[in-house]
Image (cartoon, helix red, strand yellow):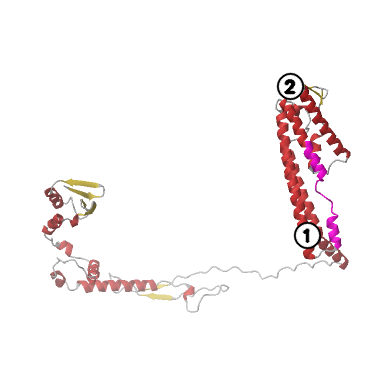
Amino acid sequence: MYLVELRPGKEELYRTGDELAAAIRSGDVDGHSRIYHRATSKWISITLHPQYKAIVSEKPATPKSVLERTSWTYLNAQSETLEGAAPDDRPSTEPQGDEGSNPWRRPMALSITGLLLVLGVQVSFSGPRPPWSGKGGHVPADVVTRPTPTPTTSHVVSLASTSARWDQPAPLIETAPLPVVDSAPAPALPKAPRIRAKALGAALSAVTSASKTENANTVEGLLAGYAAAYDSARSRLGTGMRVARLGQLFAPSRLTPNGGLTETRLALAGAANFFRVYRQQEAGIERQYQDSFSVLSRKQRWAPKAVRMWYSRTALKEPPALASLSGSILATVDSLLGVLDEQAGAYQLQDDDRIRFEDPQAARRYGELRRHIQAALDSVKAAGGAEPGTPMAYLIQAIGSTRLPVEV
C-alpha cells in the first residue's frame, strides 16, 4: 500500500503499485505530491520514487508548436535575446532552423530598443527648466526676477512620420513678489528712574538682612528652620485631632452604652496614637537641629554671641512633666471608660450629672479614676495650661466644659 499526499491537506491510499502507476499517468499524482516512507517515517517527494521516475521517463518529449515558437513582435524577440545570453542546462528541443530563417529579428529588436531609449532622453531634456537651474547658482531671495522667455527647440521623433519637427517655447514661470519688510527703527526704551544713594543703601541692607535670615548656615537660619519644623509637626497633630473627633469628651452621649461609649474609646485610641507620633517627631527635630548646630558652629567657627543665641532660644518641645501628665490622663480616661464598658447595662446616667452603679465595687473603682483625672486637670489649669498646639492643649480643648458624672 502507498499513502500519497496529492496536495496539502488531501491524502490518498493506493493499495497496489498498479493503482499508483495509473494515478501517475492520469496526472492525479504529479511532481508536487509526496509519498510516506515507512522506513524513515517521513514524507518524501514522489519524484524520488522509482516507479514515478520510470513512468516519467516513458513520456516522449513533446516539441513546441509553431505558434509557441514564433514571435511576432520585437519585444518577444528582445526577451529571447536576453534569455539567450544566460546559460540553460535543460536540453533544448526547439529546432535551430527558425533562427537561421529570420536573421533580422534580433538586430531589429536591439535597434528599436535603443531608439526608444534615445527618444525618452530627448523628451526629458526638451521640457522647460526652472529659473534656479542655470549656471549662475541660486537666485537671491531679495531680488524678484522674471525670466526672459527663450524658445527651446526640441526634436521629437514620431514613429508615424520621419519629418515631424516643431519648436515649443518654454512656459513662463511667474514668481510671487516677496513681502517688503519695514525697516523702521525700534522705539527707544524709557530711561530708568534715578535712585538716591540713601534709598539704595536702605534697600540693599533690607535685602542683605533677608538673605541672612533665609541662610540656613547662620544661627538665624537654623532657628528659623527649627521653628518651621515644629510648626509643621503641630499642624499635623491638629489635623489628626480633627480626624479623631474627640470633642466634648465627658458628655453624657459619649458615656452611654448604646454605641456612644465604643466610639469614644476608638476616638481616644486615635488621639493617643497621634500624641505618640508627635512626640517621636519632637525627638527627631531636637536631635537633628542640635547635630546641625554642633557641625555648623565648629565648621564655621561661630562667635560666642551666636552660640548663646542658640542655647537661649525658646524651647518648643513639650516639657517632660506635661508630656507625662497628658499620657497619664489619657490612660486613666481609658481605664474609666473600660469600667463603664464592663458594666454596660448595669449603670444609669441621671439628669443631675450623677451615675448610679448596681455593683458597689464598680462604683468605687469609677470614683477613684474620676478623682485622679480631675486632680490632674486642676493642676494643669492652675499652672497656666499648656502651650497651644501641644498634646496637653488639644486634650484640654477636647474635654472643654464637660465633667465626669459623680458616682452615687
Does residue 65 sit above or below 278 in this rendering? below
**Element class at badge 1:** helix
* Residue 312 on the magenta segment: yes
Label 2 neighbour load within 10 Å: few <14, some 14-19, many 20+ = some
Q: Residue at x 83, y 31 (%)?
A: 371
Q: What span is in magenta?
A: 304-329
Q: Identify the residue position indicated by label 2 in the image.
A: 346
Q: In the figure, residue 156 lies in which quadrant?
A: bottom left
First in sequence: mark 2 vs mark 1: 1
Q: Residue at x 83, y 23 (%)?
A: 352
Residue 364, visible in the rendered structure: yes
**Element class at badge 2:** loop
Q: Which secondary structure is most common in the magenta stretch?
A: helix
Residue 215, visible in the rendered structure: no
Quick one: quadrant of the C terminus? top right
Q: Which amino acid type is marked by label 2? A: Ala
Q: Along the horizontal axis of the image, is 216 left or right of 147?
A: right
Closer to us: 258 or 211? 258
Label 1 neighbour load within 10 Å: few <14, some 14-19, many 20+ = few
